[in-house]
Amino acid sequence: MKKNYILLLAGILTFSANSQNTITDFEDLNLQVDSFWNGNDLSGQFVSNQMNFQNNYDTSFGGFWSGVSYSTMRDTSAPGFGNQYSCIAGEGYNSSLTYAVFNPTSDTLLKTNGSVASIEGFWINNSTYAYLSMKNGDSFAKKFGDSTDASGNVDGTNGNDFLKLTIYGENADSVEFYLADFRGASASDYIIKDWTYVDLSTLNPATKALRFNLTSSDVGAFGMNTPNYFCMDNFEIQSPVSLSENQLLSTTIFPNPTVGEFQVNFGSSFHSGSYRLFDISGREVISNSFSNQNSIQFDLAMEKKGVYFLSLESNGQVLTKKVIKN
């Protein structure tokens, strides 16, 4: 569990008071196991760390919600609308307890609070409701990969089904991610079941709010038949870059993402100093010093997939870099 994760991450980043990656992991919301918050208190939002999440709860017809809720539900087997708040992984990212559940609308659903240099990304997964609907079909939605709809009629897709999430910034830019994709060869068909990282660093750095939209190949007379849900955890932002870090902006990491080995390059300059590499839970993976080098080699082959933070110290200046292992 990661209840102390924010404190651990803060400890990592005290190396650089002016450069900071901040993770919103929802553990600060203190929700009991196998429960959820869906906005029925009519507050219209909730705040976790530096992020503001929008929610709309309509009291009509017994009450229903849209926007963002948060959950600790662990049900990975019950199909249907009654299981709206569970993630198909049965837990949050990195075995955590709490995660967010999105039922997106056209409205802005996520806003940053405070000083933010850029939105970096988040971890995503399918809800149990959407996953089982796409895998098996139900009375409303088709089974992905079939050429017939929920009523057994030929639907014209030839089984080339998909569920796509589009994340919109504030500057007419966007990022697309497929939660399910059956459009290629059958060997490449998939429905996401494990937490997967979505990189948003290509969005305009001035972006401070996001909109989300799900689209599916399975569409009926009243819109999308596939359940309009996905789950999010560990949303990451970066604080403004300090002047001291600008002196180290020539430092690059390649390849990043990596499958194991990667190299830190200092450009044409030679540096001496030290480094510490941490995983996303705050565990120190490796630390060492370096002397009169223009590059450093690393190998994460024996480490788990996920996000790591590399803190480099040289001549009293500190630079924190994110490394992703696939």
Image (tube, helix red, strand yellow):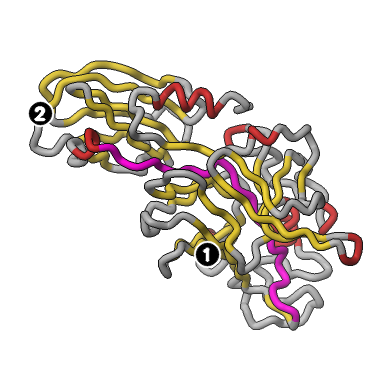
- Where residue 174 appears, x then y in whole percent? 45, 64
8 vs 80: above or below: above
The foreground one among 148 and 162 is: 162
Picture residue at 44% right of the left edge, 51% below the top: 199
Indicate left or right for 180 with 63 as reference. Answer: left
Magenta segment includes 235: yes
- Where residue 64 appears, x then y in whole percent? 82, 60
Give the amino acid at mark 1: Thr
Number of residues whose C-alpha sits closer than 10 Å to that of mark 1, classed few (under 14), some (14–19) or many (20 or more): some
Q: Which residues are magenta?
A: 222-242
Give the amino acid at mark 2: Phe
Q: Quadrant of residue 270?
A: top left
Picture residue at 53% right of the left edge, 29% below the top: 6
Q: Which mark is residue 166?
A: 1
64 vs 50: above or below: below
Q: Quadrant of residue 227?
A: bottom right
Indicate left or right for 95 with 174 as reference. Answer: right
Indicate left or right for 263 with 175 as reference. Answer: left
Determine the CA span between mark 2 and mark 1.
42 Å
The foreground one among 243 and 295 is: 243
Number of residues whose C-alpha sits closer than 10 Å to that of mark 2, classed few (under 14), some (14–19) or many (20 or more): few
- Where residue 125 appears, x then y in whole percent? 61, 49
The foreground one among 154 and 65 is: 65
Tell me which numbered mark, 2 or 1, is placed earlier along the sequence: 1
Residue that carries the numbered disc 2 in the rendered image: 270
The foreground one among 168 and 49 is: 49
202 vs 193: above or below: below
Picture residue at 91% right of the left edge, 61% below the top: 62
Magenta segment includes 51: no
